Image (cartoon, rainbow, N blue to C red):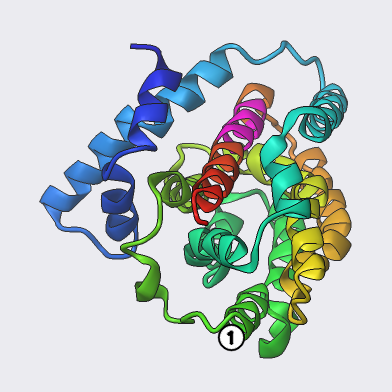
Amino acid sequence: MNPTTVAARLQRDKTQRELYELYRQVPDVEGYGTMLAIEEQWILPMARAYEADAPRFSSTAELLEGLKEFLAAEEAQLADISDNHRFLANEATLEQFKVIVREFALDGLTESESLLPVVPRLPYRSGMAVFRVLIDELGCGNDEKSHSQLYRDLLDELEMSTELDSYLDGTSPESYAYVNMFHWLASRAGSPQYFLGAYGYFETSVLYGFQSFARAAKRLGIQRDAYYTEHLYIDSYHSNHMRTAIRSLEEPDLAKIWAGVRLASDIVGNATEAAITRARKVS
């Protein structure tokens, strides 16, 4: 079966929740075997396929130019054909917006915490560039400015629970896959260079991917919308840091970096489209 077909199926069934729960603990031998089996069916075939099909970049500079072009094409496509993003920005009701907020709560309430293990896995200069991004994500030591606290503030205003376990039963497989991907990239992937490509993509794509979220929050009169507006401000700096992290590699594996780009684009895009589609079913 085609790796992307397998991945799509696994993002729609209960294995993503099972993997999420395994990632939250120190598994026993049986649990570790289950974790390996799910990864082998889900994300590893995707990573291998994208790595094998990666363009034959001749240098890091060429890869970064390719990333720039990929992001520009994706942004243009999103603006042209994503009816879901148009709906969210212009039409979603408060109840529909809350469905989307709920879908991403597992990520928002723990944002960047699962990424910390990647820092010591990277060469020093590359790791420090990533660490500068994570420091910002965690509020530079200010509890009130951490992105997870900004999500709690949003949930408070919407009169939604701020307890992580409240969202375990209602979260879709696509959203579980979104969270699991970041854990895999930081802690489980055979090379941290997958992470560099994925997060280099993510920190730039947020600048257009979050526009519909921010517009919806403003249109609906939500006051505590800083989770979205902060990303639209700070992620331009984060994007620069991630490019520095990639350029700092003395021995870059350009195919793995590119595979990370494609993985993140697919999984983040699937989760976002699924969340908005789910919200649209709410009257």
Q: Quadrant location of the N terminus?
A: top left
Q: Is residue 177 above or below residue 153?
A: above
Q: In the rendered structure, which amino acid carries the disc numbered 1?
A: Asp
Relative depth, front residue between 177 and 29: 177
Q: Secondary structure at mark 1?
A: helix
Quarter where residue 37 is shown: top left
Q: Position of residue 141 (x, y in %)?
A: 70, 85
Q: Spot the residue most to the front.
A: 283
Q: Which residue is mark 1?
A: 156
Compare residues 210 and 64 and report the one nearer the observer. 210
Q: Main secondary structure of the magenta part?
A: helix
Q: Residue furthest left?
A: 30
Question: Which corner quadrant of the image does residue 92 belong to?
Answer: bottom right
On screen, residue 216 versus residue 22, left or right, reads: right
Q: Is residue 130 visible?
A: yes
The part of the image, by quadrant, that contains residue 8 is top left
Residue at 66% from the left image edge and 33% from the top image edge: 261
Residue 200, visible in the rendered structure? no
The residue stretch that appears in magenta: 257-266
